[in-house]
Image (cartoon, rainbow, N blue to C red):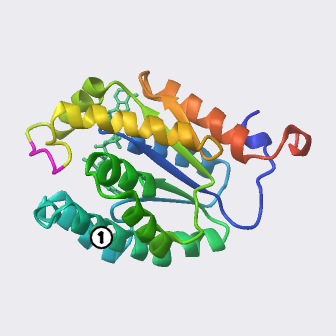
Amino acid sequence: MSESAVKWPSGRGRFVTFEGGEGTGKSTQIKKLADRLKAARMRILVTREPGGSPGAEIMRHLVLSGMGKLLGPEAETLLFAAARDDHVRTVIQPALNQGTWVLCDRFADSTRAYQGSLGRVPTALINAMQRVTIGDLKPDLTIILDLPVEIGLQRAAARRGSGTPDRFEAEKLGFHQGLREAYRKIAADDPARCVLIDANSDPDTVAGRVWTVLRDRLLPTPASVVSL
Ligand code: Z5A
């Protein structure tokens, strides 16, 4: 089924998040998906976390520079939460209400994986902050890109060139292996929302896998498809 043959759902937009470890190809895949959806005349907003709104971009600078780490894991988690609160209220929710589909590079699962599983911030605190920042908002679909850690780190290093690794890229190999496991567990625990996708192929092959999942999960059943 090509996108030109799809009867697009109307009403509230759909919220799709992309998650995964370093260099798994989230930004690359979001761009490919956005281009494909825009070509089908869908209204699409591409955004990212931390960041995505003017206030949250300030927080992004703080946490990625490593300044948040100095405050300790709980306070660093609060910075991510404050950024998310602004992003959801000022950007994501208004777009969804207007019928725009939102594709977001990282969201609340990143806090569970990085600060929860790896940073050992208690789940109760993460849950409490999630209630405050996103309330009932839940992604309609979360694509989790899965890739052997060494390959992801090689890709991230090649992209960075001679630049300095950010606060998370600089963590040791064991951290990134733990991250991969944390994401696999998130996918296994919530199969209604999350799909784990093998990202160890060329970008177009991975994009094909992403498209198949989105089509099967979020587009109308074949009975309502318009044949052109
Ligand atoms: N963080 C957190 O701790 N808690 C939170 O709640 C949130 C975030 C929301 C944000 O970093 C950091 O914040 C993040 C977690 C933490 N950790 N770090 N670092 P960021 O926004 O600067 O970066 P990122 O989200 O981590 O992205 P990334 O992992 O660096 O990259 P990516 O988006 O997954 O990959 P990419 O940019 O699309 O591709 C990387 C390179 O590989 C690039 O040169 C591509 O051309 C290449 N590429 C992509 N796909 C392929 C394939 N299929 N084959 C070969 N090469 C490829």
Name the image quarter holding the N terminus. top right
Residue in the image at 44% along x and 52% along y: 109
Instruction: Locate residue 155 relative to residue 83 in the image: left or right.
Output: left
- Magenta span of residues: 163-167
Question: Which of 191/94 is in front?
Answer: 191
- In terms of secondary structure, where does tag 1 sit? helix
Q: Quadrant of ligand 1?
A: top left
Q: Does the magenta stretch include residue 166?
A: yes
**Residue 158 visible in this rendered orientation of the protein:** no
Q: Write the residue at 41% across / 63% down.
A: 124
The quadrant the C terminus occupies is top right
Q: What residue type is labelled 1?
A: Leu
Q: Callout 1: 10 Å neighbours few (<14), some, many (20+)?
A: some
Query: Residue 194 in the image: x percent, y percent?
Result: 57, 43
Along the line of sight, which residue is nearer the eye, 154 or 119?
119
74 relative to 132, above or below: above
Asked if residue 59 can be seen in this view, the reply is yes
Label 1 sits on residue? 78
Q: Which of 50 and 103 is in front in this view?
A: 50
Instruction: Give the image quarter of residue 195.
Output: top right
Left or right of residue 14, residue 201 in this image: left
Question: What is the total number of numbered labels drawn onto the structure image?
Answer: 1
Q: Magenta includes 106?
A: no
Nearer to us in this view, 34 or 26: 26
Query: Percent x, y for residue 178?
Result: 30, 35
Measured from the top left, where is residue 49 in percent x and y? 37, 59
